[in-house]
Image (cartoon, helix red, strand yellow):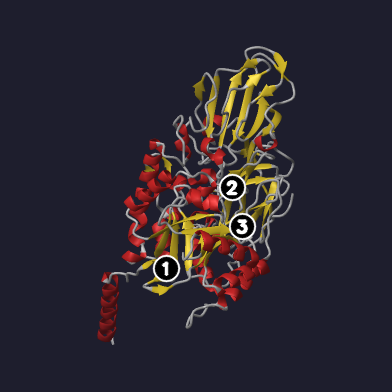
Amino acid sequence: MKLRTCALALGMLAAISAYADTPARRHTFAVEGDHFALDGKPFVIRAGELHYARVPRAYWRARMKMAKALGLNTITTYVFWNLHERQPGQWDFSGDLDIAAFVKMAQEEGLYVVLRPGPYICSEWDFGGYPAWLLKTPGLRVRSLDPRFMQAGGNYLKHVGEQLASLTVSRGGPIIMVQVENEYGSFGNDHDYMAAVKQQVIDAGFDAQFFHADGPGRSLFDGGGLPGLPGVLNFTGGPKDADEAFKWFATYSPGAPRMVGEYWAGWFDHWGEKHHTTDPANEAAFIDWLLARDISFNLYMFNGGTSFGYTAGANYAKDPPYQPDTTSYDYDAPVDEAGRVTPKFQLLRDAIAKHLPAGETLPAIPDNPAMIAIPRFELSESVSLLSALPTLAKPVASEYPKTMEELGQDFGYVLYRHRMDKSQTAALDVGEARDRVTVMADGKPLATLYRGASQHKTAPLALAQGQTLDLLVENMGRINFGAKLVDERKGLVRGVEFGDDELSKWQMYSLPLRDLSGLKFGKANPAPGPMFWRGHFALPKVGDTFIDMRGWNHGQVWVNGHHLGRYWKVGPQQSLYLPGVWLHPGKNEIIVLDDEPGTIRSVQGVADPVLGTH
């Protein structure tokens, strides 16, 4: 028996070794006439957008299994430059940022991959994915042939290629297509720039079918296209809209393969606006219409996820001039922020199931992840932000205020401090401070100014000689779409005027607040001004939950050192997703920064998000 067992074990080891030494099967994927072809046979892409940076790595595989159960055969993802190179030359492709592991996992789950490396990605992500340090160089212009930008972008794509170029289908991996830039026609029409970005993708080592994406319309496709570069359409609507879009496409690109590169099966939220939901029946009819005509698609989003920490971006309009995105990127997607199926999921699955190729069946829908509720508990310790300054940052002196980027900072807050050299009563004008300013004198809050409300000037303030004027400026997300993203510096971007005087001689404290371990908490002692509050809670077992922030005003939340993101009483989002993998059986810690203190000092965990409350 022992000999038989030993022989069996040796045989299994030999089989495993032989499998490991066998090269992955290589495929071909290309445009052939009016369709995509995999290994020479027509192939309809049924894709869904899933962003590795918006879902903890421990949940990637579960989300992919949901994609298979929905009927998808492909996963689409952006690559997030500002996470992989947070400072020049400091690269990180580890842990939750291990995109090569993400792509390989997709292949293990039987999914192909459409890669969208940018460098610009939009995605309601801070600065469209660009790292903030680009803005430290005076005059540098992103999304242009500025050689300083092109060198940085080319270097980024080179590093992405080192991670992923070997994973194209021609080399045995799952990547079937690579996008060049992203919706460039919505921004400009510099074909030399687009050609240069395409060449950088080639130089990065990618051997795949390239494409570009833009909204349906001649000006958009003219601006973002290149000769010989297939285009896909990004839009939303119902079957009628699809019919109109592809009739136009047939006249613009006759005989070209047809694909909806982003079908917006939901929408994102801005702070202070309503939570968006869309019609599942309409979306199922749209997908049914496409598949009946062998038109490929990508659901944007399949699973929205979360813009954890400070990573949410912003938009702008004439009114309001600034529209920051919420932390939640639930997107009303078929799979919700916590990885659970929604009614939309079942309707889309039924629509896809009607058009499966012969012999293909859908796997069973996996069980939803377990959710937990956490009974309400008090945050019984506190420390004020101003008293913690020596622990959090060292001051930088300057005659006039520096922007966040000039200080070498990407996210968070900057505290600007000035000592009054004379007594005066006047209005304080902070210009277009970006984005939310808490004005304090000797630690006492006097006013809050918000860019989104075009607020830059206080009522008259009486400030005395020798008083300390503090301006706590929060970066609420860089604009990620449109012309204004090119100059989206944060903090104080011009001088500060008090009456007729421009104030000089400033001290500045950079507060990215990445490490709060040095904070010295004491017994809860409410004080005016921004405060950190800490509490602890015990769990018999872990699971996903949503931290209910109703009753709090505005600030940030960390649990066990993980930055969940921003909350704000204006809504619509009033809860923050907390993945169970960030919790421990037993004792857990929560820290809340509330920069507009109220009266509530407790939180709870709830099983469902609070997304539609103002």
Among the two numbered marks 1 and 2 on one chain, the one whose residue lies closer to the N terminus:
1
Among the two numbered marks 3 and 2 on one chain, the one whose residue lies closer to the N terminus:
3
The answer to whether marks 1 and 3 mark residues whose Cβ atoms lie closer than 8 Å is no
Mark 3 or 2, closer to the camera: 3
The answer to whether marks 1 and 2 mark residues whose Cβ atoms lie closer than 8 Å is no
**Percent of width and height locating residue 562:** 53, 49
Question: Looking at the image, which residue is at 49% across and 79% down?
Answer: 357
> SS at mark 2?
strand
Q: Residue furthest bottom?
A: 1
Amino acid type indicated by mark 3:
Asp
Which class describes the residues within 10 Å of circle 3: few (<14), some (14-19), or many (20+)? many
Foreground: 384 or 415?
A: 415
Residue topped by disc 3: 330
Cα distance in 3D space between marks 1 and 3: 37 Å
Q: Is residue 62 left or right of residue 457?
A: left
Q: Is residue 374 left or right of residue 172?
A: right
Which disc, if any, is residue 33? 1
Image quadrant of residue 495?
top right
Whether residue 543 is visible here, answered yes or no, is no
Whether residue 152 is visible here, answered yes or no, is yes
- Asked if residue 201 is positioned above or below residue 9 in the image, the reply reads above
The N terminus lies in which quarter of the figure? bottom left
Residue topped by disc 2: 565
Image quadrant of residue 529?
top right
**Percent of width and height locating residue 223:** 49, 48
**Percent of width and height locating residue 63:** 52, 65
Mark 1 or 3, closer to the camera: 1
> SS at mark 1?
loop
Among the two numbered marks 1 and 3 on one chain, the one whose residue lies closer to the N terminus:
1
Q: Is residue 44 left or right of residue 431?
A: left
Q: Residue furthest top?
A: 422
Q: Is residue 376 left or right of residue 197?
A: right
